[in-house]
Image (tube, helix red, strand yellow):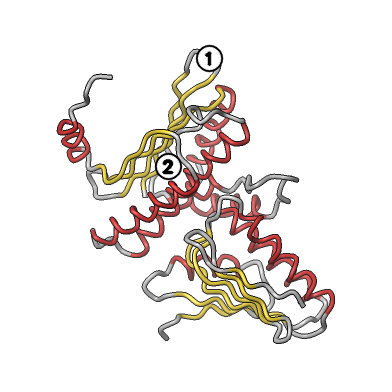
């Protein structure tokens, strides 16, 4: 590996207003620690408790979705990793982006699901959320409440944006961007 | 009576039950990865209490942030209470929230929409 220019990386992060980023395999406790850092960071930036709760909630939901997916698929540590960026956009809104490896067919399903959520207003999302909440949980599922994406869409101020980049082994890199 | 006494962690709330007083309290954030590992004993306690006793049940909740799988589990508890309420069993929820952070109150209000038993949402500072 070439020695990375940390100063350049830092400049890029600052320019793009990235508060926290992470790439690699992660554990349950790492999710919690980064979450704690995120809370502290937002507090030091004088974010409102409401904004802090929303950003934290979106971050947790996205990371746990990725963990549950990788566990369900039995992915190796490397494939079970994630790339996460939490920052702000030009209009001062908080943005949480996360990407992970998925099977291509699952990725395509996710893209179509997110597209369909994108066409729904807050009232329709709430109705869908409540409908999902009423469904019995699948036997043996650790989580899989099926509420995660709808919850993200409800917390977001803009429609969710996702992309799928196909890799050559039947897998793909799925990324999702949530603006709060 | 096998009361629950579960200490809080960073990602899970403190849970305490008191069979004699018909009281169950939960306090803190709830976003464990496997929320049913945490909530199954709680759901079982509520089920057992509602089955084996005739006394009122009161939930005191100081919950802040819940991940979606915790929301699902809490809904399961409220469903048990709703069922009991329909059989004329006195059950109630008091959900306390911090005025600084209305999100917890909004979350509580959404739960309340699906419950017909007494469900108070109270500001801690008022």
Q: Residue at x 40, y 52 (%)?
A: A35
Q: Chain of mark 2?
A: A
Given residues A161 and B98, the one toward you in this image is: B98
Q: Nearer the viewer, mark 2 or mark 1?
A: 1
Given residues B119 and B71, the one toward you in this image is: B71
- Assess whether mark 1 and mark 2 are in contact (beta carbons under 8 angstroms): no
Q: Residue at x 79, y 81 (%)?
A: B89
Residue at numbered disc 1? A169
Q: Secondary structure at mark 1?
A: loop
Residue B3: x percent and y percent?
70, 75
Q: Specify the quadrant of the image occupied by residue B125.
A: bottom left
Give the mark nearest the N terminus, 2 or 1: 2
Dot 2 alpha-carbon crowd within 10 angstroms: few under 14, some 14 to 19, many 20 or more? many
Q: Is the residue B38 above or below the residue A94 in the image?
A: below
Q: Is residue A68 left or right of residue B84?
A: left
Q: Specify the quadrant of the image occupied by residue A40.
A: bottom left
Mark identifier at residue A159:
2
Give the position of the N terminus of chain A as an image quadrant. Answer: top left
């Amino acid at each position: 590996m070439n020695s990375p220019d940390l100063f350049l990386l830092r400049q890029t992060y600052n320019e793009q207003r990235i508060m926290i980023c992470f790439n690699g395999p992660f554990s349950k406790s790492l999710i919690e620690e980064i979450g704690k850092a995120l809370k502290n960071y937002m507090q030091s930036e004088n974010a409102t408790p409401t904004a802090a709760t929303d950003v934290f909630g979106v971050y947790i939901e996205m990371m746990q979705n990725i963990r549950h997916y990788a566990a369900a698929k039995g992915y190796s540590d490397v494939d079970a990793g994630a790339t996460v960026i939490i920052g702000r956009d030009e209009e001062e809104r908080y943005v949480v982006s996360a990407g992970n490896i998925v099977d291509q067919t699952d990725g395509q399903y996710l893209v179509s699901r997110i597209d369909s959520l994108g066409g729904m207003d807050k009232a329709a999302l709430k109705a869908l959320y409540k409908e999902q909440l009423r469904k019995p949980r699948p036997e043996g599922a650790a989580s899989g409440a099926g509420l995660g994406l709808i919850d993200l869409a409800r917390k977001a101020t803009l429609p969710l944006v996702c992309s799928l980049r196909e890799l050559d082994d039947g897998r793909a890199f799925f990324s999702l961007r949530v603006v709060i | 009576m096998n009361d629950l006494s579960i200490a809080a962690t960073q990602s899970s709330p403190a849970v305490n039950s008191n069979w004699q007083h018909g009281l169950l309290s939960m306090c803190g954030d709830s976003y464990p990865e496997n929320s049913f590992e945490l909530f199954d004993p709680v759901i079982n306690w509520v089920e057992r209490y509602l089955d084996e006793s005739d006394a009122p049940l009161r939930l005191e909740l100081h919950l802040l942030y819940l991940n979606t799988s915790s929301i699902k589990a809490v809904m399961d508890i409220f469903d048990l209470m709703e069922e009991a309420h329909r059989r004329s069993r006195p059950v109630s929820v008091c959900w306390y929230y911090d005025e600084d952070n209305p999100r917890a109150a909004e979350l509580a209000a959404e739960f309340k929409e699906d419950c017909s038993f007494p469900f108070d949402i109270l500001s801690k500072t008022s």
